[in-house]
Image (spheres, helix red, strand yellow):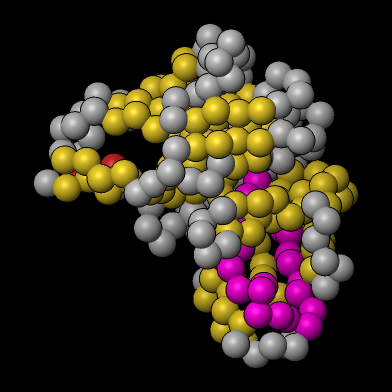
Amino acid sequence: GDSVTQMEGPVTLSEEAFLTINCTYTATGYPSLFWYVQYPGEGLQLLLKATKADDKGSNKGFEATYRKETTSFHLEKGSVQVSDSAVYFCALSEGNQGGKLIFGQGTELSVKP
Amino acid sequence: DTAVSQTPKYLVTQMGNDKSIKCEQNLGHDTMYWYKQDSKKFLKIMFSYNNKELIINETVPNRFSPKSPDKAHLNLHINSLELGDSAVYFCASSLEPVYNEQFFGPGTRLTVL
């Protein structure tokens, strides 16, 4: 079945450091890919998405490119802030599965001043 | 203007009890979901309804029964609660069941003693 694998956390960075969170997926079809963010004590919010190969999703300085050849959707940000501290989830959704999101295990990011 | 709301936010109860969690969305969406987040933050879909019809049921014990009285509401009733049911339960909604962004509620933390 479909699955998503993320790099393990926690990831601890200093403010203004470069961030990469790796995400790879396994899917039978052509899924849409998502990054969601969960701030402490809150629900998930969509951070960015890409619906087809080579699409780049971007939002709030975060970027991820849908790479079909490597089945990857790595999240990057050039300069992180303390306010970026949260848990980040990579997810996929296939069109023939009723819209369910299949999530990776989440990567906790902690940014220190 | 809360888009997806859940009640209660916290629920503490004894093993064997029956409890319900309510979810409402004011986004005019057709599709609603229940996800379970375990203690390691892993998220897994439980159910999905589209236009009040069940479209996803992910091998969840039949002690869990979702009910959708109308498109804006999806409630989750749990019978005979067990220790392993302790988790955070998230409701979400989307415009349609395919490829659309899902909007999440704030979660209900269920603790079974």
Image position of A85 with respect to B110: above or below: above
Residue at figure coordinates x 53%, y 22% from the top left? A72
Direction from residue B52 to residue B19 in the image, left or right: left
Q: Quadrant of residue B76?
A: bottom right
**Which residues fall within the magenta stretch?**
B71-97
Residue at figure coordinates x 44%, y 25% from the top left? A74
Direction from residue B46 to residue A50 in the image, left or right: left
Task: Check the image and name the residue furthest to the left.
Answer: A113
Judging depth in this view, the residue of B53 and B48 nearest the camera is: B48
- For residue A12: magenta? no
Q: In which quarter of the image is residue B91?
A: bottom right
Residue at figure coordinates x 34%, y 29% from the top left? A20
Q: Can residue A66 be seen in this view?
A: yes
Q: Where is residue A16 in the image (x, y as percent from the top left)?
A: 16, 32
The quadrant of the picture occupied by the C terminus of chain B is bottom right
Residue at figure coordinates x 63%, y 24% from the top left? A32
Judging depth in this view, the residue of A24 and B27 nearest the camera is: A24
Judging depth in this view, the residue of B54 and B52 nearest the camera is: B54
Q: Is residue B95 visible?
A: no
Q: Where is residue A111 in the image (x, y as percent from the top left)?
A: 22, 45
Direction from residue A68 to residue A82 in the image, left or right: left
